[in-house]
Amino acid sequence: MAKILPNLPIDKLTKENDYIGILTKGDIIKNFFLTHKHDFNRVKFFALYGEWGSGKSTLMKYLEKELKDSFNTFFFEAWEYESDHNLPKSLLEFLHYKSDTKVDTFFKNGAKLLEGFARSITFKTPVFNINSDKIIQSVEENSFFELKQLFKEEFEAWERRNVKEENGDKKPEYNIVFIDDLDRCEPENVLNLLSAIKLFFTYGKKTIFLCGIDKKAVDEAVKTKYKDVVKANEYLEKVFDLSFSMPKENDISKLVKVYFNEEEYSDVNCKSIDLSNEIAVFLKALKFENPRRVKKILNKYSLIDSLKKQDNKTSDLPNIITENSGTLFETLLTLYLLILKEFESQIFDSFLDLIFKKQSIKIALENYFNKSSNSNEFFREYSKITGVIINAVDKDIINQKIPTFGFRDFATIFLPFNLNSITPNSLDNLDLFNTGVSIREKKIDFYFCDFFINDSRISNIINNDQNNFNHSLMDYKRMIEDLS
């Protein structure tokens, strides 16, 4: 294995390195821009929605490369300029610097306008308003109307110098500006840049913008600055003329296979295992499919794999499958704990806290029995579950080698903390568990428990591996802490 992938956008996307299947979406967007130029006098500001790490940057870099022959392309990575504290002005200077024809007067008046813009913008409706007095305080020699008009004239003049005239040369007919890395910027800077582009930069007749947007980041930005005055969705609807979205479900199988396709894997029982497929299925079951996060976890797993291969006899490393050793359960448990440690620290810290689990179960039972008002049954069920937990504590089960897991043991130890209510006997068998356990919000600990409880094949694998477990659950928690 021992392969590490950079946690960066792919500059040259091809079928071979399209690990998450975004080329199809890229070609759809590319064809839209190539075939709808007649609409660009009215429709100029486009969004590409996708959460952090979903591949927006890779897709936009692909579009930049594919559209170079038909557009003048500009790729503005906003985060690199955030230290300037005025992203609209930085964008203006970037376009000036990257233009084929450098004309000093291009951003002269625009810079004046944008210097006061960030302090002037306010929200009174789902759109923005400008306090022109604040701008004029910064540039007293011009009125706000004059500044806007001068900026419009300069921007259109800049366009004419960069695009093909009607009778003209071989230059592209339009400019396209890609705006990336907004998810990494401070909330106020995000709003200022988007607002400035909509209000000023779309004055032009030959320039369009495609902006990579994480809706969560914009939602946070709007809440931070404007509380409940404006809703993020309303803001985005007003700003962007048209939007595209990254694929909601990533097929991470190809990405996982990059790490595991160099060799065949066998477990400690010398049973051949398609480890790439097992891990892809597991990550999908956990709803852990963000490409950037998957790469981060598999990179960390690769380091453990390398250490394991250097000294396969070492006892202070997870018992992952490598070179005819290790078990599938411990391999998946290692990945799960790596994910918790990196992205769900609160769940990781409370992992194996059986006393806390006992309190969580008590509250969940109370929520159920408050509806049925059967206090005697509540105490019987609570005593039964509490007895299992006390027994586990007395046996110091979390510090012993991973035991043979009966259904009740596994369900009790790995039961999610985020319980809403739990019915009597819910931990007795699979049917009662699936119908009786109610979760307030399904998080990764729920999906982990659900995966192992409901997949009979996995349960059989655990039972087959039981004599080969090398570590306790607490050992695993300590090892992941040491390796993180």
Image (cartoon, rainbow, N blue to C red):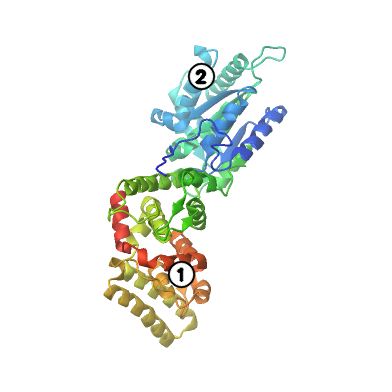
Q: Amino acid at mark 2?
A: Lys
**Residue 100 visible to the viewer:** yes
Residue 67, x across and y down, in percent:
62, 26
Residue 67 versus residue 322 in the image, above or below: above
Q: Is there a contact, CB below 8 Å, between mark 2 and mark 1?
A: no
| Residue denoted by label 2 | 98
Name which residue lies at 68% across and 30% down.
42
Q: Amino acid at mark 1?
A: Asn
Residue 177 versus residue 237 in the image, above or below: above
Circle 2 Cα neighbour tier, 10 Å, few/some/many (<14 / 14–19 / ≥20): few
Mark 2–mark 1 Cα distance, whole angstroms, equals 56 Å
Q: Secondary structure at mark 2?
A: helix
Q: Quadrant of residue 115?
A: top left
Name which residue lies at 47% across and 49% down.
264
Give whichever of 147, 110 is nearer the camera. Answer: 110
Residue 117 versus residue 311 in the image, above or below: above
> Looking at this rendering, what residue extends furthest in the front direction?
270
Q: How many marks?
A: 2
**Residue 252 visible to the viewer:** no
Give whichever of 435, 123 is nearer the camera. Answer: 435
Residue 409, x across and y down, in percent:
39, 73
Q: Residue 420 shows which numbered tag?
A: 1
Q: Earlier in the sequence, mark 2 or mark 1?
A: 2
Name which residue lies at 53% across and 24% down.
144
302 displayed left or right of 114: left
Name which residue lies at 49% across and 70% down.
438
Q: Secondary structure at mark 1?
A: strand
484 displayed left or right of 249: left
Q: Residue 59 shows which numbered tag?
A: none
Residue 468, x across and y down, in percent:
36, 64
